[in-house]
Amino acid sequence: MESYLTAEISAAALRHNLQTLRRRLAPGVKLCVAAKANAYGHGLKLLLSVLAESVDALGVATPEEAVQLRDWGFGKPILVFFPACAYSGDVERHDALAQLIANDVWLTLVAPAEVALVAEAARHLGAPAAVHVKIDSGMGRSGIAAEQAPALVGPIRSEPGLRLVGLYTHFAIAEADDKTHTREQLARFRAAVAASGGPAGLLLHAANSAAMIDLPQTHLDMVRPGIAAYGYQPSDEMHTRLPLQPCLRLTGRLMAIRPMPAGSRCGYGLRYTFTRPSRVGLVPVGYADGYLRCLTNKTAMRIRGQLVPACGTISMDQTIIDLTDVPSAAVGDEVEIISPDPTDPHSVEGLARLAGTIPYEITCRLGDRVRRKLVGPFAAVAGRSE
């Protein structure tokens, strides 16, 4: 059945972005793209063939995401960012570890207590577990504290059931104009690596999108870009702005039109008043689809080539737009809800600014009712040069 909403996902844009990012890397530096949360809402299965041809590895958050990638035929390395033993029960943990080890997935370890648990699962399966250690170098979220890293890395190195593949960290504010904290994190990470036996034979990785673009010294052996791969700038404070191409365009069909007298109001809370006789349309998108309610009376959509304001409170499933200045608009017309042109106010980046959030949230919130469809280059960005 046809959906009311369609997210057009450009394979050409993704390929362009991956090539653009790859060109920033020295020979031999691996590209591990973060593909968690359904490729940041873009549709991982839809984009998998493009990713597979261009990346050296993929990063996901959960074991379920990793096993799903293997089920879909992805044969390159997969890194699971969540700790390997974060489960409520022994049976659940055992089953998850068995699946991950059997599928040759890279596990993340963050605590000494995990060493014996993963090693036991590996011995039971008769295959070594490939692991990375995450080191907290100054983000304060996850990973073993930098000064405690040797106490985790040492036992892993001596455990025959485990194969230490890499050490990594994650930056807290690499997208900020001031890079001081990021440089300090990098120095702290390097010191932890040295104290843990050195980097020989290991993959060291730290750079997210922002660090990869602005701080080449963070590239190390592998980089882990996320948002940049899908075509969005990590922040407005970046020192370098790459010619990225957004991968997403969201459209819906105009499903109703009605007149509204001057002085009338619309939507929950009657938060919008029409100052002239108006003609409004109804678009089948709302906060259940990821179109944030906080965008109420702030944003616009495009119909028949013209921007029109969204008016009234954004509902769970519906948004009202003012069609007064587009008299030719008719029921069934395509409405562009999110534009792939980053200069548009209703682009991913434009909506993020209006909502006081980041592009990640705009794309990741796209709901299951949105049909994702693979397309070629978008007309708005097809002619962009590098």
Image: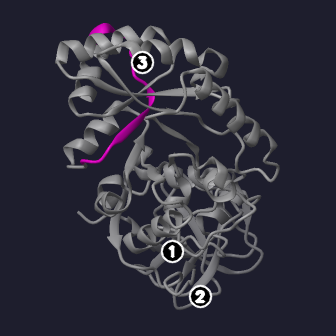
Between residues 352 and 252, which one lies in front from this camera angle? 352
Against 345, residue 316 (above or below) is: above
Task: Say whether disc 3 or disc 2 marks the residue closer to the N-terminus.
Answer: 3
Magenta segment, which residues? 75-91
Task: Say whether disc 1 or disc 2 marks the residue closer to the N-terminus.
Answer: 2
Q: CA distance from mark 1 to mark 2?
A: 14 Å
Residue 292 falls inside the magenta stretch: no
Against 369, residue 181 (above or below) is: above
Between residues 54 and 233, which one lies in front from this camera angle? 54
Residue 47 image position (x, y, % from top left): 34, 60
SS label for mark 1: strand
Q: Which mark is residue 157?
A: 3
Specify the amino acid type for callout 2.
Answer: Val
Give the side of residue 292 with respect to residue 175, left or right.
left
Please name the residue that numbered disc 2 is placed on.
326
Comparing labels 3 and 2, the label whose residue is closer to the camera: 3
Specify the amino acid type for callout 1.
Answer: Glu
Please name the residue that numbered disc 1 is placed on.
336
